[in-house]
Image: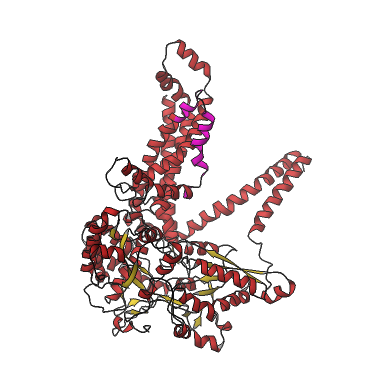
Amino acid sequence: MNNKTKNAAFAYSYLFPSAFLTLVLGIYPIAWAFRYMFYNYKGYGTARFIGLDNFTRILQDIQFWDSVVNTFVYAGGKLLLSIPLSLLLAAILNRGLKGKHLLRAVFFMPTVISTAVMAVVFFTIFNSYNGILNQFLIKFNITSSGIDWLGPKHAMLTVILVAVWGAVGNYMLLFLAGLQNIPEDVYESSALDGANKVQQFRYITLPMLGPVMQMVIMLAIITALKGYESIMVLTEGGPAGKTEVMFLYLYKLFFPLGGGSATQVQEFGYGSAVAFVSALIVGMISLLYFYASKRMNRID
Amino acid sequence: MKKQLLLTSLSIVLALSLAACGNSNSNNNSEGATAATTGEKTKISYWTGDRHDAEFIKEKVAEFNETNTDGIEVELVVKGDDFDTALDLSFQTADSPDVIRVKENTIGTFYKKEYLAPIDEYLSDELKAKFPEMADLNTFDGKRYSLPNYGTTMRLIYNKDLFAKAGVTAPPTTLQELVDIAKKLTVAGKADGAYGFAQNFKNPASALGRSARVIAEMSGFGGFGYDFKTARFDFTGFKSIIEAFKQIKDDGSMLPGVESLDIDPLRAQFAEGKIGMYLSYSSEPGVYSTQFPAKIDWAAAPAPTIDGNAKGASGFLGGQWLALSAKSKHKDAAWKFMEYMYGDSILTAYQEKGFGISMVPSISAVAKVPEVNGIEGFLPNKYDGVWPVYPIVAPEGMKSDDAFFKYMLNGGDLGAVITDLNKRYNSALDDAITNDGLVAKPDPGFDPAALAGKFAK
């Protein structure tokens, strides 16, 4: 065995554990779903081949397309709030602020807390009948009666705010890493040329953060389009589907929440088809963004 | 080179240990008797989704672990609303339980999924005679999979203090009275944050499954829209019920925030006196004596009917309790635990402590009326009866409970909603008959009123 072969053998042996995990936990379930999206399968009995019927059903499935629209509203709201906010926080904490290390840790904290636990805590804050927020608003005469934060009018806003709270610290940290890579002398020379802080931010910070920004937004888009965990705890997609996002709808097809899978039929076949279409939607949007941002970089 | 070898070995060990993870119990086949002689414990697990009796069951499991002479140790796992999902996942791994709590609406599906093992080989003639055999509730294709313990009745639960404050003397018996009383209670209680009525609409299936269902059944309609006379789905009977619920909401008599209300927070609010009425199961007295001690005087009454005429039976749910897992490696040990749980002392205590109302005739004959406050309203009366098992189908589009709740929030044409539901549910029913072997035969002589009264003392 020559050196080259030996090295390759070692390289493959190092790759083996992660490749094995990817195969078992990633590729196998995908292959499983690929097969069953052409079947009617309820999790028991025989799976029945039905060709493209599941995809025809998707085209007529108003609940699914409503969930797609809800996903865009949720993801859009989350991105519009979390990206500027995390950039602003990163810019502030990048300065010689007293206690900045502590503040960075505080802002990053939500990232390490379990989404479900976080959502349970927010439920106690936002629920309409004895939520802390309503009690606070009433006590300080900001409103005369409680606001139905998880009701039809405000539920989407509430789940977006919770998602923003959970995401800001993470993106802030990535922006902070990007900001620290911008050489200080660029700012010094621009200051000598008379640039003020706003101009520095607009003409130095933002362009030089370009690659990081591109990566963060890409990450944020994918995470937001796939997010559903906190919504499941807060509203279960309700009221009446107002916060039902794509991946929650998909989850319910596999594991119905209404009294559990035993009282409702699990739809593994249709769920697999919906999973495929949902992944396609997320993939297409991510690709669109990727090419658009690359094009913008070239124009710059 | 040495470093490379070390890393390679480490990678292989890691990979092998991962592969071994799912197989840790494969050689652990010893049963109770063998374990007792060798001094090793046979560990089995019991999974339940019940929380109202959790403390009692915990106590009994601990007692079994201490007293059994077969070296069996039971791990009690109390799951929440995710019980069915967790069970599904457990059966995909090596961690499925040995004993499973089954209910009237889960045993059929668990049987089809092949989660359950028949228990006939363990049943003596005495046990067979003691525990009634009930088709589709504990027996499938001639084999028994569970035995009954207690049944669950459904009632209207009301806040007597708020009723007195509002000057209402009796609970409602019709839908119109339900709407009117909810309004009166709200007028009397709103200043203190109390409202006339509540439902746990965070999960519409759970909310309507404990409210609209019993009103429909009492009024002679199938509780899930299925008509046993015609063997077709027909949700027409739900029209006036859903309209009444909508009226209560539109009147402002419904607790604010019911859209995100789960059943436990609803109970917590009722215990605090913030809710005038709601509909639920006979597990409530246990809840208010242990889980959420009630600060109010409350009682239970038969659910109202649509027009005051009881043309059906208020569902008495049960017929099963514990089942043996088909995947259990310790079936004998698991049965010994089940045998202990089905012993007279536990079944009697179960009723006397108010966790449920016995469906076992020999227990029912001797068990005292539970000492738990409020249980008297839940004891079987002339309206209670066991309905046949409803077929579960998979309609395309929105489920009935979601469609009804959407109507309650947004309004629209309820007649059109019902026509659409009938069409989609019957199409799913036909599909299940053709492709999944579901049996649904019309029974023109089916009389829901004849189901009632068989358990009344």
Name the spot of residue B92 as percent of width and height, x first: 55, 63
Point out the image quarter for the N terminus of chain A: top right
Establish if A103 lies above or below B425.
Answer: above
Give the residue furthest to the right. Answer: B2
Q: Quadrant of residue B7?
A: top right
Which secondary structure type mostly characterizes the magenta part of the structure?
helix
Q: Residue at x 50, y 36 (%)?
A: A106
Name the spot of residue A52 as percent of width and height, x first: 40, 59
Q: Residue at x 65, y 56 (%)?
A: B19
Tell me how many marks there are.
Answer: 0
Name the spot of residue A152 as percent of width and height, x first: 30, 50
Residue in the foreground of this view, choosing between A170 and B346: B346
Residue in the foreground of this view, choosing between A124 and B207: A124
- Residue A38 in sight in this render: no
Horizontal arrangement in the rendering, residue B359 relative to residue A148 (left or right):
right
Establish if B437 lies above or below B205.
Answer: below
Horizontal arrangement in the rendering, residue A109 relative to residue A224 (left or right):
right
**Magenta residue check for A101:** yes
Residue in the foreground of this view, choosing between B53 and A123: B53
Name the spot of residue A170 as percent of width and height, x first: 49, 37
- Residue A146 in sight in this render: yes
Tell me the magenta residue range. Answer: A89-116
